[in-house]
Image (cartoon, rainbow, N blue to C red):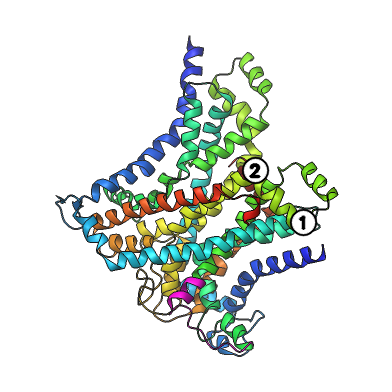
């Protein structure tokens, strides 16, 4: 009797910690956000007034919100698309008997174990207007000083480079893991038929690892739509002014997540910030859904 | 083939160079940055700059906090993930498959969107400004559970468990005497991965902590957001606050990469 009770109950007890924790600190906050968003709700006020969808109305008429949406999409495209192409290609290069294989893999993953704070501090120096290494190198080929943080396009490029630097190697290893599961015979047969490396990549590898491509596209999309630490720290450590939350003095690189943070933790308007969070969530789902449909259509010839 | 090595070497160079260059800047004086061409070799100012870091922010406290937070999170994640992984991989119970799918699906939930109620919850619990706010929500996560489930279903033979049952072990006894020893290699990798991501976590600590009781990453961001742009100071902080971890990674990299790639195949 004691025995059956043990085998029946213990499995639930063993998985319970995860579900309890996720429920309390993951799921509950997500839904409570929706509830808060329907209220006039600030940190300081004792009372919260129900105001229906009024926060959403204000939000959709807010130019700063749309500006942040544009910046998020722009940085998302600039950082994700080249990153995916590059990481598939790198994985393809590594998917071969190579000397120094481990050394290459470790160096590819170094950026990913560097903290985001360190990444932005380092790259803010590299992208510095006056003494940055990148401007110095550009000056060697005759390009004048670029004030990277000041412009919309240039700041988006700088931020995308930081994001790419941190994630390309990581994604390459994920793709490599998938490529190693592709049966060798396929390549051997293709080689006998005289197919080049590039053709093999297009006709065999990419179709075979499509589930992984879809997975990485979705995860990268969700990540890209939530970018916050990079613009936050770039705003302060590039010295362009504007402080921690505005994403540059003209909000030229304020992302959606940063806009939410500004409303929640500097204005302390929790109701309005929650409405922005919830709309952001819908945008994440929408963009991830579109990318899911797009990446499902990736066939051999497309890349 | 030669082109392949050349390309990979170039990529390896671009991956490592920014880290190297941060050490170069961290070991110089601010005035050296204005030189043309810029300095490309380390200078002799590193320890003076590190001393300035400790004068500017409570960096000793930050290191202590980060060790406590990342250490307790890693231990808890290793333990609870192995426990849940054991149940998912080796025990039979109703609703198991659905629960496993839900676990994996939670990895897709953009957690950042719940940050406001989470913050309000921390105020209610009076945990803001303390390490509890960082540790408790992170005690176990879906990735860890999935990772250990994968490993145990592959690496732990059923015969071992049956032998334990015959010897009269309870389920808990099996976990303690059979599963934990067998899980050690994977749990170690999971522990290292968790430690690194907890150590590097920035956004949530920034929200709930205050600059006078920071973690390393929060202290670094304080350094980097001074009124005067002091790159040398910021990078000296970076060098002592995050590069040790990068070096540890370089040493154990082979195992950690193996872990990441194994987790990825089924992902």
Q: Which label sits on residue A197?
A: 1
Q: Rounded to the nearest whole Å, what is the CA distance between mark 2 and mark 1?
A: 26 Å
Work out which residue is located at the far right of the displayed protein and give it. Answer: A192
Is A297 in front, or is A39?
A297
Point out the image quarter for the N terminus of chain B.
Answer: bottom right
**Would residue B146 appear left or right of A176 to someone viewing this image?**
left
Give the residue at mark 2: B262
> Which structural element holds mark 1?
helix
Q: Is residue A114 among what the camera can see? A: no
Q: Position of residue B230 (x, y in %)?
A: 47, 80
Is-magenta flag for residue A151?
yes
Quick check: can you spot residue B112? Answer: yes
Secondary element type, mark 2: helix
Task: From the viewer's side, name the closer residue of B46 and B247.
Answer: B247
Chain letter of mark 2 equals B
Q: Quadrant of the C terminus of chain B?
A: top right
Q: Choose top left, top right, bottom left or bottom right for residue B210.
A: bottom left
> For the point 51% across and 18% down, which residue is it?
A7
What residue is at 80 percent from the left and 53 percent from the top?
A195
Residue B101 location, x and y as percent?
49, 34
- Residue B249, image quadrant: bottom right
- Nearer to us: label 2 or label 1: 1
User: Counting other residues with Cα less than 10 Å from the Cα at mark 2, is it few (<14), some (14-19), or many (20 or more)?
Assistant: some
Which residue shows up at 85% across the image and 48% down it? Answer: A192
Instruction: State the residue in front, B27 or A22.
Output: A22
* Viewer-side residue, A48 vs A210: A210
Look at the numbered discs 2 and 1 and tell me whether their residues touch, using CB distance below 8 Å: no
**In the picture shown, does residue A66 fall above or below B116?**
below
């Amino acid at each position: 009797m004691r025995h059956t009770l043990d085998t029946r109950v213990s499995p639930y007890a063993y998985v319970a910690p995860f579900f309890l924790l996720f429920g309390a600190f993951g799921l509950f906050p997500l839904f409570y956000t929706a509830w808060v968003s329907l209220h006039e709700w600030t940190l300081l006020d004792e009372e919260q007034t129900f105001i229906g969808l009024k926060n959403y109305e204000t939000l959709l008429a807010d130019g700063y919100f749309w500006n942040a949406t544009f910046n998020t999409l722009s940085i998302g495209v600039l950082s994700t698309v080249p990153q995916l192409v590059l990481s598939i290609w790198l994985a393809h290069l590594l998917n071969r008997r190579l000397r120094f294989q481990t050394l290459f893999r470790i160096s590819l993953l170094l950026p990913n174990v560097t903290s985001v704070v360190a990444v932005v501090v380092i790259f803010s120096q590299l992208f510095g207007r006056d003494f940055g290494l990148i401007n110095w190198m550009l000056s060697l080929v005759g390009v004048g000083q670029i004030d990277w943080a000041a412009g919309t396009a240039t700041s988006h490029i700088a931020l995308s480079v930081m994001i790419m630097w941190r994630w390309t190697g990581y994604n390459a290893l994920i793709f490599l893991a998938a490529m190693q599961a592709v049966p060798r015979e396929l390549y051997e047969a293709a080689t006998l038929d005289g197919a080049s490396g590039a053709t093999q990549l297009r006709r065999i590898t990419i179709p075979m690892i499509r589930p992984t491509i879809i997975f990485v596209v979705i995860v990268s999309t969700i990540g890209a739509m939530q970018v916050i630490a990079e613009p936050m720290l770039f705003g302060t450590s590039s010295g362009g002014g504007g402080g921690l939350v505005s994403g540059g003095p003209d909000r030229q690189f304020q992302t959606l997540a940063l806009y939410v943070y500004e409303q929640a933790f500097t204005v302390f308007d929790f109701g309005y910030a929650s409405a922005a969070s919830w709309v952001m969530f819908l945008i994440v789902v929408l963009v991830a859904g579109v990318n899911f449909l797009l990446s499902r259509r990736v066939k051999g010839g497309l890349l | 083939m030669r082109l392949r090595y050349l390309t990979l070497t170039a990529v390896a160079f671009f991956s490592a160079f920014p880290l190297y260059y941060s050490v170069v800047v961290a070991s110089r004086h601010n005035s050296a940055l204005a030189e043309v061409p810029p300095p490309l070799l380390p200078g002799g100012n590193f320890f003076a700059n590190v001393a300035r870091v400790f004068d500017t922010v409570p960096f000793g406290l930050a290191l202590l906090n980060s060790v406590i937070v990342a250490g307790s999170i890693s231990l808890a994640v290793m333990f609870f993930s192995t426990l849940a992984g054991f149940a998912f991989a080796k025990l039979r119970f109703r609703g198991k498959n659905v629960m496993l799918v839900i676990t994996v699906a939670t990895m897709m939930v953009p957690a950042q969107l719940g940050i406001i109620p989470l913050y309000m919850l921390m105020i209610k619990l009076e945990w803001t400004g303390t390490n509890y706010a960082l540790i408790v929500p992170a005690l176990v996560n879906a990735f860890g559970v999935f990772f250990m489930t994968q490993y145990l279903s592959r690496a732990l033979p059923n015969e071992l468990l049956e032998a334990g049952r015959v010897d009269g072990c309870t389920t808990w006894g099996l976990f303690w005497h059979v599963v934990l020893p067998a899980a050690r290699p994977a749990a170690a990798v999971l522990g290292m991965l968790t430690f690194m991501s907890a150590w590097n976590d920035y956004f949530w600590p920034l929200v709930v902590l205050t600059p006078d009781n920071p973690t390393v990453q929060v202290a670094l961001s304080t350094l980097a957001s001074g009124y005067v742009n002091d790159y040398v100071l910021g990078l000296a902080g970076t060098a002592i606050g995050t590069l040790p971890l990068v070096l540890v990674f370089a040493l154990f990299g082979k195992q950690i990469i193996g872990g990441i790639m194994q987790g990825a195949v089924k992902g």
